Image (tube, grey):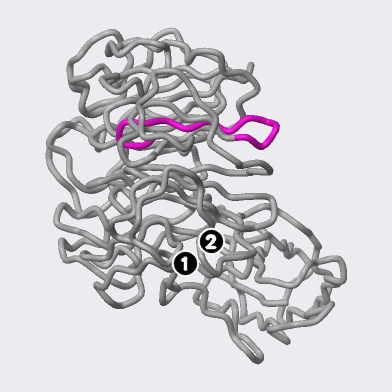
Amino acid sequence: MQAEGIIPLPFVAIAMAWGRNDFGQLGNGSNTDSNVPVQLSSLTGITAIAAGWSHSLALKNDGTVWAWGINTLGQLGNGTNTDSNVPVQVISLTGIVAIAIGLDHSLALKNDGTVWAWGRNAYGQLGNGTNTDSNVPVQVSSLTGITAIAGGEEHSIALKNDGTVRVWGWNAFGQLGNGTNSDSNLPVQVSSLTDIIAIAGGVQHSLALKNDGTVWAWGYNYHGELGNGTNTDSNVPVQVSSLTGVTAIATKYLHSLALKDDGTVWAWGENVYGQLGNGTNTNSNVPVQVSSLAGITAIAAGGYDYSLALKNDGTVWAWGYNYYGELGNGTNTNSNVPVQVTGLCQVATSVNDAFPPTAGLSMAAFVFPNPFENEFAINGTKENGVATILDMMGKEILRQKTFSSETKINTEKLLPGFYLLNYKEGNKKENMTVVKF
């Protein structure tokens, strides 16, 4: 899925990808484009994904990072410059809690608050005081207490635990936001920004979300990427017009997205291919609402001109550019309104043989009914089992031990929607299925 990986995955998840694949960026062992989702090869236990223009990253639940796709500038971080169409492990990285991606460079945040980078460094986007590419991770200089990271095309962004923002790399259009247009191979502070809770990087612009639900932007603005009603670049943050109650932001190319607390999505910037999703192909320098989308829980912007959204029913929706099948709906036709990605979230409508013995359990365990109302049962469970309900973002909602061959789970407090059911017996591996309420 060639989009910035702000959509986290359940902790035992596999990854699916679709779109352009000439460098193996889908990670399925081939170099053939796909307009429907295909499964990533030989990688499980994924907790987060990040996808750029021609390479991709995955974070595993053991804190390691894996990469695949183009590698001419070392963006896979495995000590070589050889492309790979299957995941390879990034060298010497452990304890990683977040990942991000740029055009030709990659970023990782460690659990000690430090940031590591690898790949292209022509503009200083690795932030280590040099402009030399690196095919292994190098530490970003003088950064501690970092809580989030983001990659632009040729610049990088980090959020500190004090609510301020640091940036480094290319700055021709003011995308570093420090009041200058000079590149920097060391982190510099964005001017006059405090109380920030989220960040995102576009080709030549940057976004930040404040704790009051407002969005701020800086950098290139030819297509209205800054969303402030003008088309004038700015090397200091300006407020995006008329947006409040925002809970998440995303950008990757020449348009920007915001998710509001009512589950609606808003977009601004370039719209040549319909990437704003409002039924037109007209650019907008102020936010416009994406058509017919509600109940959205996460958003992402593609490496080129398309957008993605995850609904609270577990479905994924896409709109914009689709030449290589980026929308994942089985066609290669652009769409200026959201279309559903196919082949994701298969849910049974009757008794579901959820966990066959081949999944690692001592016997088959059946989940029924599915869909359910207020209560469902797992038949075939053991006394030493644990059932866990998670939402579609992987957040644990309910945990219950199993004490007999049939365990009933009360879900009266759950809102209608799709949930992930994880079941584990003793030391056996976890197994996951989707249940619908």
Residue 384 figure quarter: bottom right
| In the image, residue 327 above or below residue 211 | below
Magenta segment: 202-214
Q: Secondary structure at mark 1?
A: strand
Find residue 390 and report its horizontal and vertical position in percent.
68, 60
Residue bearing mark 1: 317
Q: Is residue 206 magenta?
A: yes
Find residue 15 and report its horizontal and vertical position in percent.
41, 59
Residue closest to the far front: 230
* Nearest to the observer: residue 435 or residue 174: 174
Write the residue at 30% across / 23% down. 173
Q: Secondary structure at mark 2?
A: strand
Residue 372 figure quarter: bottom right
Per the rendering, the mark at residue 310 is 2
| In the image, residue 158 above or below residue 222 | above
Q: Quadrant of the N terminus?
A: bottom left
Q: Is residue 263 magenta?
A: no
Residue 222 figure quarter: top left
Kindly check if marks 2 and 1 are in contact, taking CB atoms under 8 A apart as contact.
yes
| In the image, residue 437 above or below residue 246 | below
* Nearest to the observer: residue 222 or residue 390: 222
Calculate the distance from the C-alpha at mark 2 to the C-alpha at mark 1. 6 Å
Write the residue at 55% across / 13% down. 192
Q: Is residue 374 visible?
A: yes
Find residue 77 and report its horizontal and vertical position in percent.
26, 33
Q: Quadrant of the C terminus?
A: bottom right
Q: Amino acid at mark 1?
A: Trp
Find residue 39 and report its horizontal and vertical position in percent.
35, 66
Q: Earlier in the sequence, mark 2 or mark 1?
A: 2
